[in-house]
Image (cartoon, helix red, strand yellow):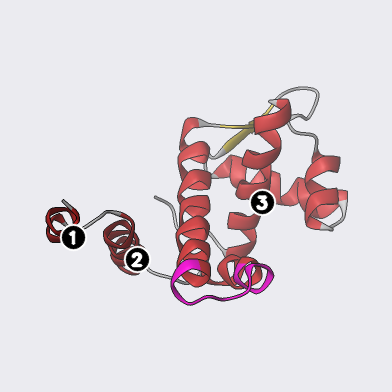
Amino acid sequence: MNQLTKSQENYIKIIYELSLHEGAVHISDIAANLEVSKASASVAAKSLEEKGLVWRDAGRLVYLTHKGQKQAMSVLDKFWIINDFLINELQVDSNTAYLDAHALEHVVSEETICALRRFLDEQKSPDANDMLRAE
């Protein structure tokens, strides 16, 4: 996938989250959620459109493309894996974990995310030996 900046990842995430509720997303809603000006949100949407991640209709509503949805879900997946690890394995306070996961999602490698996912999956699934001992 195209390498996105931290800012672009934040925009694509917000567009995805807003589109889940409303389908089409207004520039003003993007701006309000990211606490930026409408002009900044419009420039970012244009940049994402040039990358093929969103498209805009004549009414200037923003829609994610399939490629944009995949990119947004990838960023969100990273966030939730990191958040889960911080809370459940390191016992970090949920508010701190939330903020840290938002910061880390932009810098952690795909290799590290895969390793964290495997680790968390192993922690959640009972070991075969544990199941035999329980019987």
Disc 1 residue type (three-letter): Asp
Span shown in magenta: 88-97
Residue found 18% across the figure and 53% down from its top: 131
Residue ID for mark 3? 11
Could you tell me if residue 121 is visible in this image?
yes
Residue ID for mark 2? 116
- Label 2: which secondary element: helix
Residue 74: image location, x then y, percent:
45, 49
Indicate whether residue 60 is drawn in magenta. no
Residue ID for mark 1? 130
Sequence-first disc among 3 and 1: 3
- Label 1: which secondary element: helix
Sequence-first disc among 2 and 1: 2
Residue found 14% across the figure and 59% down from its top: 133
Q: Nearer the viewer, mark 2 or mark 1?
A: 1
Left/right placement of residue 42 relative to residue 85 reads: right
Disc 2 residue type (three-letter): Leu
Residue 18: image location, x then y, percent:
71, 38
User: Is label 2 in contact with label 3 (beta carbons under 8 Å)?
Assistant: no
Q: Reply above or below: 99 against 68.
A: below
